[in-house]
Amino acid sequence: MGKCVCVVCEFRNGAFRRVTHEVASEGKRIADALGVELCAVAVGSGVAEKASELGRYAVSKVYVADDPALENYLAETHVPVTAELISKCDPAAVILPASVNGKDLGARLAARLQAGLAQDCTQIVCEGANIKALRPIFAGKCFAWCDWADGSLPVISCRPNVMDCLLPSEGKAEVETVPVQIPPVRSCVKAVDLDTSGKVELTEAEIIVSGGRGMKGPENYAMLEELAGLLGAAVGASRAAVDSGWRPHSDQVGQTGKVVNPNLYVAVGISGAIQHLAGMGSSKFIVAVNKDAEAPIFSKADYGIVEDLFTFVPAFTEEVKKLKSSCS
């Protein structure tokens, strides 16, 4: 067995993303169960200045590759550099985020490390020295336990917003900056088009309010925007709404959109097609608003409201305003 559990960090725009804290927290639980330390690898531009803060999430040591050429994720650079850093750790397991970049990185890393990969996992357990991971299969209709043969290195990507995050402490991690050779590349990132609206990102939102075909038009999403603003939520959409041009593809929740795992998911005017359920079915609490009592979404919902959304949403928004006003 290796000397530590190694977590792969995701560093973007000068900060570690929340999902990094989640995988570090999960890595700590696994490391404690195995009786080893928790270490991390971090790749990026300017990451060395921030790496010590990972000690707040129980990381004891961080191996860092800091270079301007690593500012944006590119498989040709990040995969070999990350693999080189991981080799410094002698890991018993490698855990990384199942984000868009993380899924790509995880698959390529597993091939390079000749390791077994379990993607998009929602639970990790230890049975003695053996690690098992639970992951959804068949678009979330089933779950499968994965384990590894003796001597095989587990590489596990964790679904964002699923793993419990440790409360941050005052600790600081030891940082070792590793000089790495950036390989020559045949491609480059010319520009990154970021959403600068200040809205909550779907994949990291704790509350999501989503609208579907029942919204009847793009202008009616204003009521969902208002409700989301009061709740501190992100606004999502079903594929039908996106295909109709009512919302941008970045708002799409589902198998061909974004997989989300908020604490609260409010589905408004969404029938509940399998494709959509695959993207939000693991939300902790699901509230569905639909005037069709037979809509499939109700089979997944914790709370169902059979009502015309154009009657319910404005009334509910007013109640939220009153509640917030009384608490202020």
Image: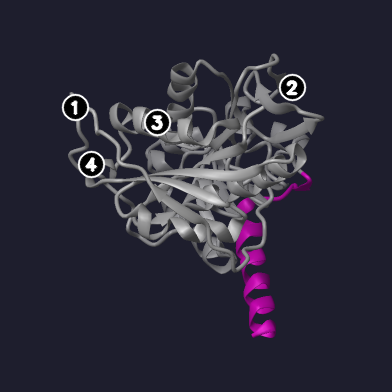
Sequence-first disc among 2 and 1: 2
Report if residue 323 lies within the magenta region. yes
Q: Nearer the viewer, residue 83 or 26?
A: 83
Q: Pointer 4: residues within 10 angstroms few (<14), some, or many (20+)?
A: some
Magenta residues (range): 302-328
The residue at the point 47 percent across, 52 percent down is 17
Q: Quadrant of the C terminus?
A: bottom right
Q: Quadrant of the N terminus?
A: top right
Q: For marks 2 and 3, give the CA distance.
A: 29 Å
Q: Pointer 3: residues within 10 angstroms few (<14), some, or many (20+)?
A: some
Q: Pointer 1: residues within 10 angstroms few (<14), some, or many (20+)?
A: few
Which tag is nearer the camera, tag 4 or tag 3? 3
Answer yes or no: do the residues labelled 4 and 3 have beta carbons within 8 Å? no
Q: Position of residue 89 (x, y in %)?
A: 52, 36
Report if residue 12 lies within the magenta region. no
Count the marks: how many? 4
Q: Which mark is residue 69?
A: 4
Q: Which mark is residue 184?
A: 1
Q: Position of residue 272 (x, y in %)?
A: 64, 33
Q: For marks 4 and 3, give the CA distance.
A: 16 Å
The residue at the point 65 percent across, 78 percent down is 324
| Residue bearing the label numbered 2 | 145
Sequence-first disc among 3 and 1: 3
The secondary element bearing badge 4 is classed as: helix
Q: Nearer the viewer, residue 147 or 151?
A: 151
Kind of residue at badge 2: Trp
Q: Which mark is residue 162?
A: none
Q: Nearer the viewer, residue 101 or 46?
A: 46
Which tag is nearer the camera, tag 2 or tag 1? 1
